Every structure is written in structure tokens, then in C-alpha cells.
Image: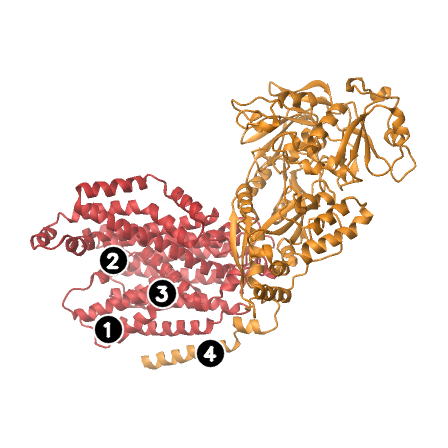
Chain colours: A orange, B red
Amino acid sequence: MKNKTKFGALLLLSASIMLSGCSVTTKNDAAESPKPSEGTEPVVDSSPADIELLGMSSNEADINIIRDQLTKNGFNVKLNVQADYGSFKSQQDAGNFDIALSSWTTVTGNPDYAVRSLFKTGGDYSILADADIDALIDAAGAQTPAEYTETYKQFEQQLVFDKAYIAPLYNSLKAQAFNQEVLNKDSVRISKSRSLPWEALDFKDTAKRAKDALVLQSTIPTLTSLDPIKGNDGSINIINTNMYVRLVNLTDDDKITSDGSLSYNHAIAEGNSDYYFILRDNINFAQIKNKLAVDTGERVGADDVIFSLDRAKDKNSVPDHRTFTLHEHISKIELVTDTASLDSVKVTGGSDSVKAALEKGLSAPISALVSDKTQASSKDGKYQVVKLTTTEPFPQVLNYLAHQSAGIVSKKQVESINTYDVAKFDVNKDIPYGDQNTVTEGNAYNNTLYTSGPYILSSKNDYEAIFYKNPAYFKGTDNEPKINNIKIRFIKDADSSLSALRSGEIHLYYGVSETKYDVVKSDSKLTLQTIPSNAVSYLLFNTKNRPVATSADLRKAVLYSINQDEFLAYYGGNKFKAVSTLSPLVDTGLELKADSAKVKEFLAAYNASK
Amino acid sequence: MTNPSITKQEVQFRLKSSQEYGQASFSGIVSLALAIVLLLNSYVPSTGAFKPAVLIASLAYFVFTLLQFGVWALIRRDLIRSGAIKRSTRSLGYVLLLSLLSANIFIATSAFQLVKVKKSAAYTLAAYAWLTTVLVFAVSALNLFKPYVANGFLTGMFLLIVAAVLQLAALLLIARHADKAVLPRWMWAVAAVLLLTSVSGNLFALFLGLLLISKLRDKGHTSGSKLGEVVERLSRSSTSMLGLLFILFLLTLSITSYLTFDYGMAIANNYSLILQSPNLAYPLGTDNFGRDLFSRIVFGARISLVVGLMSTFIPVVIGGVLGAISGYYGRHTDNVIMRALDILYAIPGILLAIAIIAAFGASTVNLILALSIGAIPTYARTMRANVMLVSTLEYVQAARAFGASDSAILFKHIVPNSIAPMIVKSTLTIGTAVISTSSLSYLGLGVEPHIPEWGNILKLGSAYLETHAYTAIYPGLAIIALVLSFNFLGDGLRDALDPKLD
């Protein structure tokens, strides 16, 4: 009896599994049916190529997407994931990669900057050496926006499609979230390229201005340098933008403006080589005394402008000059004292004289041009005017002047601090202007900053940096800083930063990641601001000692493996397609489309050439 | 209801000495807790409605919990009245066995114990072996709801069902015949079949096969094998048997997943399925790359178990040998070995692991080495202490008097008698190794980020804790359950191997 039941059970069970077997789709069945979602079939007639992908652990999601796409297209992907930018950079410099996950933000908002230092032979960040690419960059730089679109299209065709030096991934949004219960919603600006202007920020409760500190956030407690020309990275861009005033600024949508800058007006003379700036008289340098900001009484004038821009373009003005290539088009910067010389020059594309253009909107017309900055007085019509001459016609120079590295420093102060000989600079002995150790709490603290911008750094440690407003900056105008005290809290981890914002520990968090938008939106006390930015992520191919350096076929195989739609899907549509670092600035009409047929073709060609 | 003729102490003693009574109350309480958790989970606060599937599961749990508590009351009454459980009460265990259909292993395991009056080690092992296979089959069968299954799925499932049927047959045969003093000769065939089914990773079947063989060879001359005694003692503790069940379930699942699970689902991104809530096709949901969390956790078990077991096994062997040598020879040998190990002991384990991985790169082999090296000194210390104790015993003196060599004395007489505390200690530290693996992966120092490892899965999920909590909860639960299982098993083993209870 029992045996019979057992046998019956066995029969029943086998029957059921066989029946279910008939309706089950196995992986091979699924792959045979023409489903596009299934892309893991082995690559025919091309053996897999090894690819080493270098990236930072903060970009783990992108790394995983790239790995997945390359693997599905028949590559053996080896990951080289580094914990921070420092180790990433040293791996990159050592050449331990085939493709490096890189990103670039064009903070000046002009296309030339988006390509010059990245792709031109000898550029600051360039590992390329291609004469055709160089020629196109130079040609486009001299052209007006109407003309350069076609040139940049050729450039992108060469850089991405013909030679595949980079494989573009996406263009990002810029996002910041702030506590709307603390901050006045209308005072928080978000700009495409420009760093957040602190002078505009205001509390919801204006009574808090004098006593309460506004707390911002940054990830990097090590500040490269507080001398604007000696750094161009995430640790100091926002800080130096708010500590030093410039000749011009960018609007939120990347137009050149004189609003909130050192000049009342600027004018471009006929020929696009001469640029004139008429200076304000209501900004003094601030300095720190007993850890508080005081007015030095020294006006920011033409001599400081000339000094600052001269040292910005001169590679040898300081050791570790990081920004001279941005200003290599400046040929000469000089003081104009002859009013008649302004009258005789016409502005570009118009019939007005430069003088008329500079006088536009001023309460008192130019009665005299003075050489001594202390004599300048706007209400009496006594102004200072500086003239900048470029090496060739180059209208984009104004964008570079809006960059933090063109911030105006005090001639008197910097010269009194930087007394060392640049050629024999000894990092152990000489203390340059803006050295972060001079503002770090401890024995080395000796704050010698003279700042022309709305705020000045009083002191910092690994936990936070404390800023005070410049008491003599645009006093009595709309541009006068509202909040007396701003703190930057250093929080390395993105999730911790968001928690700090939500708990009220910080008031504004710049750089919210796409995957956290939902969290921010669902929190009633937070406001999320987003704007398309100039940040582009791309894969940079190694140009030395690797197969990808010599084989364009292999590079193109990687290029056509990249599917930007999948990136967009992963980020919930909060990214945009890109072709190169130019994409957010110039619409060339080109687009990268993933194509696994082309990948096979190029891989086969690569294998044949081996 | 109480019998006035017996004292309160007697009642207490009867209840406490009954295995079934303790197991019934334990499984009833755990089952009730699970039923409540399911009920709470089925409620959707936003709409005020209940999720039907979860609600049904919860109701099933409640029904069996009520039954279990009823049986518990009957057992209590029987024990107080007569000091033994009635046949009618025991037969209710068959009803409780149906709880297996609702995946309620807590009630099912206690029911297995209830239906049999005289429980031999063989019976317990057979029941657990069958349970394990059935559970693995059920869990693997969930793959049927997926758009497609692995190529080996049908083969794998067929083999599993064959194993389940064979093990069920073995269970029935053993229930009937294993109590006899001399086993019938055809038990050899049963043992061989069981050994064959243990290829799936079902170690219960392996132990059972070995137990049967030793009993067959013994032919009733001795009272029973050591393994049988240990299993019998271990099976008295519900928690440690459940722990062992979960561990062997995972082990079997990891091995059978080579056939029944598709690795592509766990590792290939699918952008049309990003962050799906748990459903039939994706029982634990999908992660932010559209990968199936269920498959990822199953494949993650493989890494967690391999790393956990290997990084315990290596220091047990190395530390054991070093400790045995230094304990046996003493004097200078002892001094040199132990002082060197003391230096290693002074370095914090996790820091040493981080340093090794930072220096040699993140890979599974390096991870195992990094976790192993730091654990050597503690094992050496344990072994040394045991060896020093055992080497003074008379039988060691006797062996020495017979002129046995040092190595023969050490490895034939001393080490086998000092190994029990090492086994207990190692079970307890496997849990720690699993946690360390996950912690290192969480910190980005373990295996590569896309590899399904529990720490990696948890790390990705933690970013979505607020919006898609399941991405973090399930891997977290898996880690907790495995570590807890090893700890329970270690506890049970300590009691089972304790010579003082002999």
C-alpha cells in the first residue's frame, strides 16, 4: 500500500515537472527569439579585447553601467577603482588605464575653454597631440558664435567620431538644495556656470543677518590655494569666486555682464582685440584682524587690476601657477588716462565711441581719467579706465575674465608677501600669498589675505571654514553682502551631507545627486533647484603604451559600445546626451548612437591588425 | 486541569524534560511573531488597504500558529496528567506538517519531532535532509515566474525533485527501521543513495549516510557512534538545528544555483526594470540597475559562505598546528611561536585586513587571506591551551611509555581530543568573517562593486533606504540570518560536544 502511494507520488511529481518544462522559457530560448533586451550572445569572429577602466568610487554607478555595456559588447573589462581624486589622478598620470572616466565643467561658459586645456597639444589637462585638432581649436577661438558652430562641428567629428579620442557619456544637471525655512527663497541663485554668489544670499528672517551664521557645505577641507591664480578645482572655485571681485561676471545663463563686478561698464573696440573697462570706486580690500574682517581703507583700483592680470597670464609669476593657459590670449593690460583716446575708437559692430559705451548708465559722465586710484570719484566724474589687448582677435577673453582665476588681488599686499624668488622657491621655507596653512588654525596661522570680494576667510580647520563679509564692498547698494557670517562645513560623504541638510546642520547643499532628487522633493522644508550645467562626463582614452593608444579601431569599438540612452534611463532622465565637452555650449547637431554591429566590425578590424 | 496528586515541582520537571513541549512553545511564538510581521507588511498605510498576497500568507501563519498553540496546550495537559504525550496528540503533528506548504519551517520542524515517539539521530537527520531539499526546490521554483530561466533550470529542478523523493523514501524507511539494534542489509543502498544526494550540498544527507554506514559496520556491538550522540544532543536545541538548517539550505542553494539560477539576472543591467518593487517575477524587487535582487542574494550567499568558511578554515589549520606544536613541545618552541603570534595578535584584525587589501588589491582570494591572517593567533592560543591540558593525561603517558613517536602522540592522541573547542570557536567566528566580508565590501574594499556580494548589495541598497527600502532590508536580513545561524549552531555545538555532559 505504502509503496504504491510512493510510486504514485513519484509519477505525479515527474509528470508535473515535465508539464511545467514544456512552458518554461530558458535563457537560450529567450536569446534565440528576436528580443532586443538580450545582448549577451557571444561575439562572432572577434575575440574579446581587454579594457582597463579607471574611475573613482564616487562614480561607481557610471563605472558599472560602462562595464555592463562593454561586457555585453564583448570586452573583458578590468576595473581600477580609486577611492579619491588624488589616487585617481596618480593612477592616470602613471598611465594605468585604457579608458579613464573623466568629467569636465566649463566654468567660464565659453566653448574655447571647453576644449583648449583638455585637447590641445600641451594644454593643462591634455594628453593629446594632434595637429588637426589644434588647428580647429585655434580657428574656432578667433571666430564669432555665428561662425564657430561649423568649426566646432568639424572638431567634434574629428575628436569623437573619426579619431575617437574620447567617448562621451552625458551632460549633467547642476542641482542644489537649501532649507527654505532658513534661507530666503529668492536670494538663492543657481547659474549655469557661475559659482553661487554669496552676497545675494539672505535669511528668511532678516533679523538673523548680523548674528547667525549661514552654513554651506564642501567636500574638500584641503584648499589648494587662496591665491586665485594658483588653483582651479572644486576645493576653491566657489571660495575664491566670493573672495575676489573680477572685471566682469557671468549671468545665470552665461552672458557677460558688469553687474556686481569691479567695472561699471565694458566695451569692445573695433577689431575685437581691445577691451575697455571703467572701474567702480566703492570696493575696498578687506583683511582679517583678531579673526574678524576689517576694512583696510585701500581701494581696489586700476593698479591692482593690471597687477592681477599681468601675473595671471605670466607662467613665472608664482610657483605652481595653475591657470596661465586661461589667460594666454592677454597680450597687454594698461591704464588709460587720455579721455580723447576713448572718443576716437568705435565699439565693435556699432557706431558709438568706446567713451559713450563706457558712460552708459553712469550718473556722472567721464570728466577726467585719473591714474591714482585714491583720486577716483564716480560722483565727480573722475574714473579709472583699463584697456586690455589680446594677442589676436578673441572675444571669448571676457569669459576668462569672469573666471575666478582673474580675481583682483591687492598689488601692495601680494608684493609684500611674495618676496621669494620664484625660480628658487623652497616649499619648506617660503610662504606664498594664499597658502592654506596661513589660515588654518594652529601655529602656522597668520592670515595675510587681502580680499576684494564680498567675503573674506577668517580661519579654517578640518571641520569648517569661517568667512566674514567685506565691510567695504558695494556699501549701501544691492550688491552689499547681506549676511555677516558664512561657514563652510567640510563633509566628504554625499549621503552625510544630505542628512546634514535635512537635520538643519547645513543650510545649503550644492551638488545633490540625481538619485536623491526624490528624497529632497519629498522633504517639505527643502527646495531643490536644478539647471542644465556645463558639466560633461566622458571616457578619455590613454594615448601611451596601450593598444587603445595606437588602434583607432579599438577606440571606436569602445565608442560605439556606449549607449547614452541607458545612462539617461538610469538617472531617470536627469542627464542629457552629449557628444563632447562642447555639447552644453554649442549645438553641433551630432549625436552618438550605440551600434553593436559597428562594435563587432571595429573589433574584428582591430583583431586583424594585431 | 492540574492533577492535584503531583507537586508543582513535578509539573515543572515534566514540562521541562519534554523536548516536544519546549519546541512547541518556541515554534508557536516564532510563528506568531512572523504572522504579525507579515500582517503589518501587508497593510498599505497610504490607501488603507491590504496587499492580498501578503495578507493570505499572514493568515496562513496565523492559522498554523493557532493550531500549534492548541497542540501545545494538549501536550501540556498530557504531560501534567500522565507524564507522556498521547498518541492522539502526536498524530496532530501530521496536520502541523502541512505548515510546510506555507514555508513555516518552525512549526514543520517541531511537528517532525512530535510525530515520532522515539527520535533517533538518523530520523532527525533524515527529516532535516528532506526539509532542506524541499525548501531549496521551492525557492528555486520561484524562478518559473521570471521571463526566462537558466539553461540548466529544468535539469536542476528535476535532479532536486529526484533527490527530494529519494530522501522522503529514506525518511520513511528510517522512521520505520532505524530504531532496530541491527539495521537490515539493504540500508547500505539507502546510505549510498543519501551520500549521492548530498552532492547538492545537503550535508544532512551526508551525515545521515555516514551515520547509517557506521551503524551498519558496527552491527550493534557498541552503543552508537559519536556522530549520532552529537546529532541527538544538537537536535534537542531548536535554535541550533534551525541555524544548521538555514546554513545548509544556503549551501545547497549556492551549489544548485549553478544549474537553477541565471547569473546574468544578477549581474547584467536591465534599464527597463529599475527599482521594481517585489513581485512574482522579482520576489525581492530589483535594484537601481534593474538587476534581480533575489538572484543577487542567492549568488551572494556563495561568496559569503566561501569567504566565511575559508577564512575560518585557514586559521584553524595554521593556528591549530602552531598551537599544537607549541603546546606539546613547550619551552623555547612555545616561546618563539607564541611571542611571534602575540605580535600578530596586537594588530587589530580589521585594520590588518584593510592594510592587506589596500596593498594587494581587492579580490576574493586577497579578502580570504586578509581575514585569515588576523585570526591565526586566537586559534593558536585555544589549541595550545587544550594540548597542554590533554598532554598530561594518562593515555598520553601510556603512549609515550610504549615508545610512540612525538608526531604519532601529537596527531593521533592529543589533537583529536583537543579539537572540540576549536570546532565550537570556529563556528562562532564564521559569523564574524561573514560580517567582516560584508563590512569590507561596504567600505569598497571587498570584491568588485558589481559582483553580487551581500555587503555590496547592502551598500547599493543603503542609498535607497528611504525611497526603496527593500533594496537594503533583504540583503541586511540575509546577513543577519546567516550570522545568527552560525552563532546558534556554535552554541548548540558547544553543548553537544561538552565532555562534562557525557
Residue A308 appears in the figure: yes
Q: CA distance from mark 2 to mark 1?
A: 21 Å
Q: Which one is nearer the viewer's eye here, A475 or B367?
A: B367
Q: Crowding at label 3, few (<14), some or many (≥20) Cα neighbours within 10 Å?
A: many
The type of residue carrying mark 4 is Met
Viewer-nearest of discs 4 and 2: 4
The type of residue carrying mark 3 is Gly
Residue B177, label in figure? 1
Label 4, on which residue? Answer: A18
Q: Crowding at label 4, few (<14), some or many (≥20) Cα neighbours within 10 Å?
A: few
Q: Which one is nearer the viewer's eye here, A416 or B74?
A: A416
Based on the displayed image, in which of its 4 quarters is residue B404 positioned? bottom left
Going by the image, does B389 lie left or right of A1? left
Which circle's residue, 3 or 1, is located before the other in the chain?
1
Residue A198 position within the rendered picture, expressed as x and y whole percent measured from the top left = 69, 32
Q: Crowding at label 1, few (<14), some or many (≥20) Cα neighbours within 10 Å?
A: some
Residue B233, label in figure? 2
Q: Which residue sits at x=11%, y=53%?
A: B395
